[in-house]
Amino acid sequence: MTVETKLALTGEDVRSYSEANREPGWFADKRQNALALAETLQLPKPDKTKIQNWNFTEFPVHAVQDEPLTGLADLPQEARALVDIENQQTIYVQRNNTPAYVNVSDELKEQGVILTDIFTAAREYPELVEKYYMTEAVKADEHKLTALHAALVNGGVFVYVPKAVEVKEPVQVLFLHDSEEASLFNHVLVVAEDNSSLTYVENYLSLTPNAKGLANIISEVIAKDGAKVDYGAVDVLAEGFTAYINRRGIAGHNTTIEWSLGMMNDSDSIYENVTHLVGNGSRSEAKSVLVGRGKQKQNITTKTVHWGQDSEGHILQHGVMKDEASTIFNAIGKIEHGATRANAEQKSRVLMLSEKARGDANPILLIDEDDVTAGHAASVGRVDELQLYYLMSRGIPKTEAERLIVRGFLAPVVNLLPIEGVKKQLSEVIERKVR
Amino acid sequence: MSTLEIKDLHVSIEDKEILKGVNLTINTNEIHAVMGPNGTGKSTLASAIMGHPKYEVTSGTITLDGEDVLAMEVDERAQAGLFLGMQYPSEIAGVTNADFLRSAINAKREEGQEISLMKFIRELDSKMEVLEMDQDMAQRYLNEGFSGGEKKRNEILQLMMLKPKFAILDEIDSGLDIDALKVVSKGVNEMRGEGFGCLIITHYQRLLNYITPDKVHVMMQGRVVKSGGPELAQKLEAQGYDWIKEELGIEDETVGQEA
């Protein structure tokens, strides 16, 4: 059975958005094709969460207009705390759907590093963007949400690191949300050529407590042979969004992709983080921490797909659930035929802070090759009574002791974020959310 | 002077009675040793004083300067001046030793009176030096991946930083080689003096070669069956426990449960 979805936007609407955006033909055509697909394709089916009744298609407006920033000093207080304004040279800031500020250090410019909004990139670097934009990592025709994303993309950023260039300072990206009406169809495309290295850190930050729109966000990381990409993210989207956040990577030979994801949304969210270890000797570390509170419903799937020989994939998911929040944590290690000596490891731990919260950890290993190693550990439980006793026996009150344990539990991601302001912000968000 | 007084203490774990009427009084400026074979209730005594969640006090009292310790939560007992150096300290990932210690010190202080970072670091450095601990131990996660000896030193480090009125050291000597034993003893001896009392639980006399106790108690069958001075520990070392069992007509000294 196919269910036709009537979308709020027509092909005509999307076409005129493309024109206003001065999009190249191939990009605009991609939208039109995707829009047709979005009407017929099914929603994805995240394991153990029914999303048929979630609103992924209705939103107030496609794009809102904002003024760009004159400089980083112009940033709202809460956002400014994320940035080392004196020293952060390579940074992109987007306000709702408007590219608000971008700067690339002279050194990186000379080396050919690109950081620009996705539409400018499509115009100015079509040979790169057309090659990688929704062609390898994520495709528009996967399901309704990827199609909808391709049809309605209204923001995002392109990062390009040429061969053998090592980007030493982290590239920082802020996606600020301060309009209730806004929807975020952001697309992040990161391309790291052979033997290059990049540390990329992005923040999704709602500066308004409520949202009426959709967040349908896709990040693609294409890491070529010998490249190393560290991808850090802290998502703090307001209640009211329905969020679909898909971050996917493709690793070449002897390539490493590391994900450090802080999932701190207050909205219902479907998360997907997939790494394809295509090349021999490729590696990934996928670490996520998540806090659920209120009546929030979330589903997170972290998946590593091993294609290359000697590929090494590690998944860590730590979640804290309180109030009546509910989250499903799926960790999937998939080893394809031919990926000899691959190693797929995963750990999922859920800490329950209230009786009514729900947390499920599903460890899944799918193995089509004989000569491999794999391991999984999954646990759901309360704060360890003996740990509490130990801390309290040193005079630390129970609530503070719990706070310390929770903080420690979520530290694996906090400690990996390379930008001090972002690290501090994640700590603070965690404190605020678990209090 | 402060006094920790234990009267007719009965303690059960999962409905099995382990302590069957323990009486013990310790003053500050005194070091007591509780000795005895395995399974006689020594560690249960330590855990009951601190308020371990698995141990249930069924009757008797514990008071600190007249205050009812049993009515206090675990953290309140620590705030009141009790400290337990544990036999099996918990490992807590993601919380550094230094952060934990600062939280513990500040928990005892009023808001706005928190220890300054500089003072804290100075003190931590000097105590770690006494205990011959690597400086990087401060930034490692609390007890995570620590060797047995490192954990014991870390317990003594906490003792020295928190400066309680009474410390109970539960088999702090187990699994320590002779050098580590000396270091741990040095830490305890630094604490010795006015305002500090200590209850050392051990089944070996060797620790007492380095920390001379003022009083020695022997536990069997969940009670203190004999008390004396340091010479009692020496006699136990030389002759074992059998003479006490004979003297008291005890056949099986245990309470049927590993203490």
Image (cartoon, coloured by chain):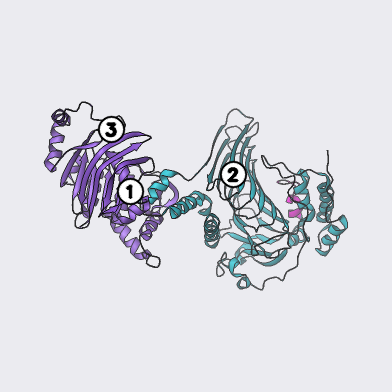
| Residue at point 61%, 64% (across, down) | A90
Q: Is residue A130 magenta?
A: yes
Q: Are the residues under badges 1 and 3 in a single subunit?
A: yes
Identify the residue under disc 2.
Answer: A358
Disc sitting over residue B164 in the figure: none
In which quadrant will I find the C terminus of chain B? top left
> Circle 3: is it few (<14), some (14-19), or many (20+) Cα within 10 Å?
many
Q: Where is residue A233 in the image (x, y as percent from the top left)?
A: 60, 55
**Is residue B179 visible in the rendered structure shown here?**
no
Q: Are the residues under badges 2 and 3 in a single subunit?
A: no
Identify the residue under disc 3.
Answer: B39
| Secondary structure state at the residue bearing disc 2 | strand
Q: According to the colouring, which chain is cyan?
A: A
Task: Residue type at mark 1: give it.
Answer: Leu
> Circle 2: is it few (<14), some (14-19), or many (20+) Cα within 10 Å?
many
In which quadrant will I find the N terminus of chain B? bottom left
Give the foreground label among 1 and 2: 1
Magenta-tinted stretch: A127-139
Identify the residue under disc 1.
Answer: B70
Mark 1–mark 3 distance (CA, rounded to whole Å): 24 Å
Give the foreground label among 1 and 3: 1
Please give the chain letter of the residue carrying mark 2: A
Q: Tell me the shade of chain B.
A: purple
| Viewer-side residue, B256 vs A136 | B256
Task: Residue type at mark 2: give it.
Answer: Arg
Q: Where is residue A115 in the image (x, y as percent from the top left)?
A: 67, 61
Task: Residue type at mark 3: give it.
Answer: Gly
Residue ranking furthest to the right: A12
Please give the chain letter of the residue carrying mark 1: B
Q: Is residue B124 above or below residue A380?
A: below
